[in-house]
Amino acid sequence: MKAKGYLAEIGATVSADFEKNRSLLSFDEYLELVFAEPRRHLRNAAQYLKDAIDSFGTSDVPHPTGTIRRFKVFDEVPGDGSVRVAGQEEVQGAFYRLLGNFVRSGAINKLIMLHGPNGSAKSSFVEALKRGLELYSHSPSGALYTFSWIFPTDKLVKGAIGFDGERQKGAVGASFAHLPAEDIEVRIGNGLHEHPIFLLPRPERLRLVQRLLGDSADVVVPSYVLEGELSQKSRRIYDALLAANGGDYLQVLRHVQVERFYVSRRYQVATCTVEPQMSVDAAYQQVTADRTQGNLPTALHSVVLFDPRGPIVSANRGLIEFADLLKRPLEAFKYLLGFSETQEVPLDQMILQVDEVLVASSNEKHLSAFKELPDFASFKGRIELVRVPYLRRWKVEKEIYDAQVNERTVGRHVAPHATSVAAMWATLTRLKKPIPDRYPADVRPLIERLTPLEKLKLYQDGEAPSRLSQQQQKELKKHLPALYEESESYPNYEGRSGASAREVKTALFNAAQSSEYDSLHPLAVLKELRGITRDKTVYEFLQQEIVDGYHDHGEFVNVVEAWYLDQVDHEVRESMGLVSDAQYRELIERYVQLVSAWVKGERVTNKLTGQQEKPDEGRMLEFESFVMSKSDDAKEFRKGLIASIGAWRVDNPDAEVDYAKIFPDVFARLSNHFYEERKRTLKRNVENTLKYLSDDRNSLSAKDQTQVRQTLDAMGSRFGYTDGSARHALVFLLRQRYP
């Protein structure tokens, strides 16, 4: 490969992309684009952001309140280095509805305030929106345009750089937009990213919009497009050019170079984050102060030009984020009262008119204090509050840790369930005891006795406690949406307090450095979590009063440890092949066939005799003896089982029946039953495995060594264990369950 040839290929690609993307245009070329696709080029920042979100698409995801829409702009983008916003579909929906309101009203007239506890993904939420804007701006449908002023050299135009010289008044002359760089004396850029449509006089602009869009009921033309005006700098250049050319508007347009620009987080183009500070987020500087008089066109020598600058200017035509807004003194952001409603900021030399979606964030403490101030009444009508709570589904919480705590980031193997125990504990700390009085009398006892772990499982997979009868489980699940939304109207809502993902991630990274383990092991994580619960002066959520097991954060570590022990036990049994999930499924399937025939009053075929017989009552009762709750009636249990399968088939008509998903409690009881029968065999096999992993390997027979190796290989391939992480898990299992 030759360097010159390589660079030539790149150069050809860049040039082709430049032409394809229509990066530089004359004003009449730009108008052709507007004529062809008026809706795309006549939208404001709210419509643009909404279109950007829509361009990524949506998906339906399960939720405690039913299926809910998730916007894919909040998912991870391959190759972008971005992180997925786990959960928060309710927040996405609320934000999208507010954008829709802005679009329908034709104006961005409020500030959206994301509020919630520290570490609830408010910043990540906005970062995903910015990333979406950035990617969308590089697509054909997301093209954005602004303009600059171009003045050619004396060689091209007689006199004072485009203000004199021979011309035919009223004729469309050749634009200076496509002049090569060496023929341009001065180019005055546009840091405000002004809309090129502002170069049309307002009356003509109104008529053009009417012609292009007509009276379409589904299109609301933004007031920014209809009523917006050129900035102070552009207006003075425009007026000076118009005067120098004797009022010839077409000669003014020769100096306009329309250019495509792209949203950029890194370079703060059309998106910007403002950290807490003491000043107004916009200012100006004198353009002519930075140039010699000789470099500017003659007609501009006596014109004082001011160029606006600052975060508000940089974010124009896009989105601006005011991070932790309420940490500022009130006087530093009081200007937002007018800005959020009118999109105008008064400066000393001008009134700055911009078009951008305003998003702020705040934690609950600062918001509560802000509500007590007299000025809050003025802000209330100009702010839309969107709550961003902590997550309450542990598998969704786990997605956060899996994305950021992995072998690459911690530098060692991540053992199975390391992030799971952290996610479960964090989620348990956020749950509140339900209020039984809000539910019908027949359900109150079920709600009253719901433990934190049972509530956690109910939120996650709709799994009702196995101690309940099938009818009770059904009733409890029916009230799951109400249970999940129970505290939404309360100031101290569920998800406002508890362990934050940031604190738990720190615990995970600390556990990864443990010298006791050669991996990030769940046992090391549990040790770190116990350490957190000991210092109530550091973590405010530890100061909560324990109510019927809720907020008992130290005990939650034990709860999660017991759950982890069950997982290890199950995986070891599966890996040893004594009884597998496939065998459980086969047993349940046989039972279902008998029950189905019993419910319908049909006969079944005896596989040995081939005769048609009544369903074997003895076999059904034997199976029910170790899977049915003591509070269940056998007949009702059978009918409920068939009804559950029927309901599942309605929701999943094309899928194979998944008994493990429909009856998780039945699977668990089957597992426990066979565990008691094979306890001695399991213990001996666990002991052999630990010997194999120690210096006593040679004390095992060749047959035992082969069996152990098969077990370890199965633990690795099926569940992700290494020999080292398996050894620590097995020692833990042997001590706790097979002493």
Image: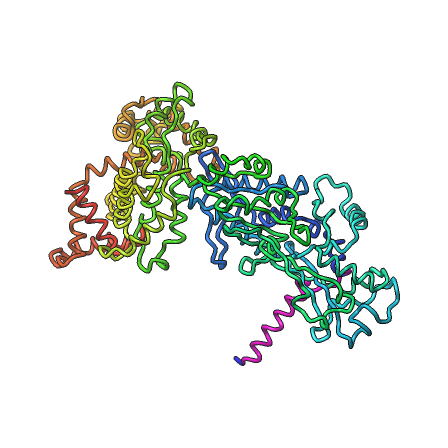
In depth, the one of 551 and 469 nearer the eye is: 551
Q: Residue 602, located in which quarter of the rendered image? A: top left
Residue pictured at 73% horizontal, 69% vertical: 296
- Residue 259: image x %, image y %? 68, 62
Q: Residue 138, located in which quarter of the rendered image? A: bottom right
Q: How is the image coloured?
A: rainbow
Q: Which residues are magenta?
A: 3-28
Residue pictured at 56% horizontal, 34% vertical: 377
User: Does residue 610 appear anywhere in the picture?
Assistant: no
Residue 625 vertical placement versus 140 (above, below): above
Q: Is residue 17 magenta?
A: yes
In depth, the one of 479 and 112 nearer the eye is: 112
In depth, the one of 264 and 576 nearer the eye is: 264
- Residue 352: image x %, image y %? 66, 51
Q: Is residue 179 left or right of residue 444?
A: right
- Residue 80: image x %, image y %? 50, 58
User: Does residue 360 appear anywhere in the picture?
Assistant: yes
- Residue 139: image x %, image y %? 61, 57
Q: Quadrant of the C terminus?
A: top left
Q: Is residue 547 magenta?
A: no
**Label tally:** 0
> In this view, which residue lies farthest toward the left?
699
Main secondary structure of the magenta stretch: helix
> In this view, which residue lies farthest toward the top?
441
Q: Is residue 473 left or right of residue 334?
A: left
